[in-house]
Image (cartoon, grey):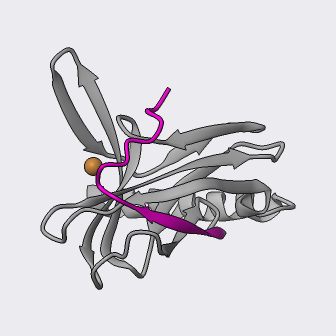
Amino acid sequence: MKAGKLIQWSVGVAVACLAWNAQAAESQAAGVQVEQCWVRAMPASVPSAGYFTLRNNGDKPVTLSEVATPAFGMAMMHRSESNGSMAKMEMVSSVPVPAHGSVSFAPSGYHVMLEEPAKPLKIGATLPLTLSFADGSSVSANCAIKSPATLGQPAQ
Ligand SMILES: [Cu+2]
């Protein structure tokens, strides 16, 4: 059975990954820092967006795999790309951050798309954002809620 073999193979890979993770002395979250996190607050009818710089001070690359916040029903990692006059967005399931490097979530690049606010967003307040990594570790940040007019620094 083809399906049976595929499942066996998947389990094998999962076990191998767990074993590999167990060898890591430090969790991925231990070496990372979330800087300048902010959220562009939009009316509830359209998505808001979250931005930050993720710095990896560790000697190994880390992989950001999920972003979540209790302030929204849905948080997704997206990447905007423009080719000429067309701008499009695609969903990303993981974002690698090189050792001793950083990745910026910024307007016109990576961003966190936030939908279904739990309650109206207050400009000037903060909301918590939790970033999870491929090894299951996570780090939290407080993000400043800013007005829709805030432009921020575009992605490099
Ligand atoms: Cu988006």
Q: Residue at x 40, y 52 (%)?
A: 93
Magenta-drawn segment: 138-156
138 w.r.t. 16: above or below: below
Q: Residue at x 56, y 64 (%)?
A: 131
Q: Is 74 left, or right, of 105 in this rendering?
A: left
Q: Nearer the viewer, residue 145 or 34?
A: 145
Q: Horizontal and vertical percent for residue 30?
A: 78, 62
Q: Residue at x 51, y 45 (%)?
A: 95
Q: Residue at x 32, y 63 (%)?
A: 41
Magenta-colored stretch includes residue 89: no
Q: Quadrant of residue 33?
A: bottom right
Q: Nearer the viewer, residue 106 or 138?
A: 106
33 w.r.t. 72: above or below: above
Q: Nearer the viewer, residue 51 or 67?
A: 51
Q: Horizontal and vertical percent for residue 1?
A: 27, 60
Q: Is 151 left, or right, of 99 in this rendering?
A: left
- Farthest residue to the right: give it: 25
Magenta-colored stretch includes residue 148: yes
60 w.r.t. 17: above or below: above
